[in-house]
Image (cartoon, grey):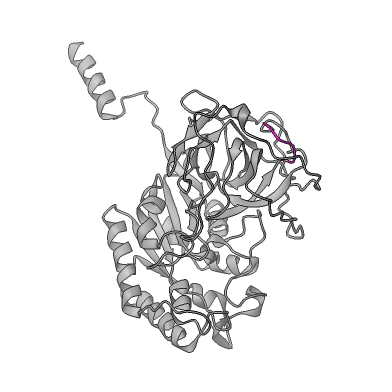
């Protein structure tokens, strides 16, 4: 008996399982990368933690059309640019988790903030077809048992686990009441802001809601997974993030990859770590891939693989025919790729290299830049440095001119895919790697 008690104590101290003890299986299931504002932009400080919440001045309730959270590709949301930083409002994010489980938890971010961020209340629920919260699914989100919390500057914060059963590809609405100001700037996404001040987190549909492009409050959703056991992190720039795809419709290539994995009954999740404007070597929109790798990849629970698609912004900015150039060499880009591979493998993580998509005709395209893009793709394809290579270039290229996008996959800027182009990229990934 004495030894049985000692064994149990040792198991509790070491975190090992004993028969009948449940094991948590937290995996990243949705992600959005927080970034600071550009170096020349001073963030707006939030309220001091000593200021009573009731003392924060509310914004006026403005008349605005009710904009549902539709994912209809024909729906073009009205984007409202707020006058100043919104304050005393409820912000609602629409997310989609890649895997199923019985519990979730949320990672909130104030990592780009210069002062404390106060959350007065947070609720989460299952999203209906119109983006409203389905009755009976609404859950309060707690922080160490408390409904309100102050997140220190430059810090993230994990919520307590929330008992909410989710299925793979389930859409959730996360409603956060922010009594203070929400600073604009940095990496942002389309979110829904109540037109009536105060705590509206329990509303099925936000009253008088408007669509703003705001800094994200939630940077990650984790699921206590039912069957999944591993995560793919897709690291890249706006092409990974899903720029020019239908807003809030989850049609980026990582979203489409998640759909393919679910259809194949794979046990892998997908977390999107793309940032528009991101680069391998220099600060762009947010820190470089080399600078943010530990947080945005190694910090994702359950990560076992990375798909790396970075470098087109280094090349474009390095050889742009208009404006100042920030020179880059092929050797430097190859060295950055090798660094990421080495750092990933030190943690047992496989790295799959994505061939850079075509960019002839883009605003910063040039013949000299094309030589570097071709050289980097040739190295990714032939070096053997990666655990596998994904030919995003051929998947999206015009067959008669592989240096430019196929017309059906790009209708605007000769740089970013449309919804069909992102589907083609997802289809280029070999699912045999993720059985």
Horizontally, residue 281 falls left or right of residue 269, namely left
Q: Nearer the viewer, residue 201 or 15?
A: 201
Horizontally, residue 45 falls left or right of residue 126, namely left
Q: Which residue is located at x 46 percent, y 65 percent?
A: 284
Q: Nearer the viewer, residue 223 or 21?
A: 223
Displayed quadrant of residue 249:
bottom right
Horizontally, residue 267 falls left or right of residue 398, namely left
Measuring from the top left, give residue 186's x and y in whole percent: 52, 55
* 378 relative to 128, above or below: below
The answer to whether one can see residue 385 in this image is no
* 152 relative to 191, above or below: above
In reply to whether residue 243 is colored magenta, the answer given is: no
Stretch of the chain drawn in magenta: 195-199
Measuring from the top left, give residue 80's x and y in whole percent: 72, 54
The answer to whether one can see residue 255 in this image is yes
Predominant secondary structure, magenta span = loop
Q: Nearer the viewer, residue 281 or 105?
A: 281
Which quadrant would the C terminus be assigned to in this image? bottom left
Which quadrant would the N terminus be assigned to in this image? top left
Displayed quadrant of residue 125:
top right
Measuring from the top left, give residue 215's x and y in whole percent: 56, 50
Q: Which residue is located at x 58 percent, y 44 percent?
A: 182
Horizontally, residue 270 falls left or right of residue 202, namely left
């Amino acid at each position: 008996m004495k030894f049985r008690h000692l064994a149990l104590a040792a198991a509790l101290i070491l975190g090992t399982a004993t028969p009948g003890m449940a094991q948590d299986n937290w995996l990243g299931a949705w992600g959005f990368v927080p970034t600071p504002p550009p170096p020349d932009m001073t963030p707006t400080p939030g309220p001091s933690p000593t200021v009573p919440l009731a003392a924060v001045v509310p914004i006026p309730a403005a008349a605005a059309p009710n904009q549902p959270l539709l994912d209809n590709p024909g729906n073009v949301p009205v984007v409202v640019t707020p006058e100043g930083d919104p304050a005393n409002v409820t912000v609602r994010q629409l997310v989609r988790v890649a895997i199923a489980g019985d519990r979730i938890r949320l990672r909130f971010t104030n990592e780009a903030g210069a002062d404390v961020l106060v959350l007065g209340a947070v609720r989460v629920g299952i999203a209906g077809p119109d983006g409203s919260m389905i009755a009976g699914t609404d859950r309060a989100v707690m922080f160490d048992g408390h409904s309100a919390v102050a997140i220190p500057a430059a810090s993230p914060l994990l919520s307590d686990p929330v008992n909410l059963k989710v299925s793979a590809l389930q859409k959730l609405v996360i409603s956060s009441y922010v009594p203070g100001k929400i600073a604009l700037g940095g990496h942002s996404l389309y979110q829904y802001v109540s037109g009536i001040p105060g705590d509206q987190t329990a509303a099925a549909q936000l009253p008088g809601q408007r669509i703003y492009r705001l800094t994200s409050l939630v940077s990650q959703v984790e699921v206590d997974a039912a069957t999944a056991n591993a995560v793919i992190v897709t690291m890249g720039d706006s092409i990974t993030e899903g720029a020019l795809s239908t807003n809030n419709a989850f049609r980026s290539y990582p979203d489409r990859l998640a759909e393919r994995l679910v259809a194949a009954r794979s046990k892998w999740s997908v977390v999107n770590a793309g940032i528009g404007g991101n680069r391998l070597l220099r600060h762009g929109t947010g820190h470089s891939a080399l600078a943010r790798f530990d947080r945005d990849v190694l910090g994702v629970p359950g990560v076992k693989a990375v798909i790396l698609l970075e470098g087109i912004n280094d090349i474009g900015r390095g050889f742009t025919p208009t404006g100042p150039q920030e020179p880059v060499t092929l050797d430097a880009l190859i060295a950055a790729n090798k660094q990421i591979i080495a750092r990933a493998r030190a943690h047992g993580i496989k790295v799959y290299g994505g061939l850079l998509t075509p960019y002839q005709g883009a605003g910063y395209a040039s013949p000299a830049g094309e030589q570097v893009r071709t050289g980097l793709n040739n190295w990714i394809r032939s070096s053997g440095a990666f655990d596998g290579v994904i030919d995003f270039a051929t998947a999206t290229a015009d067959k008669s001119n592989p240096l430019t996008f196929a017309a059906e996959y790009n209708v605007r800027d000769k740089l970013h895919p449309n919804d069909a182009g992102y589907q083609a990229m997802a289809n280029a990934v070999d699912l045999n790697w993720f059985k």
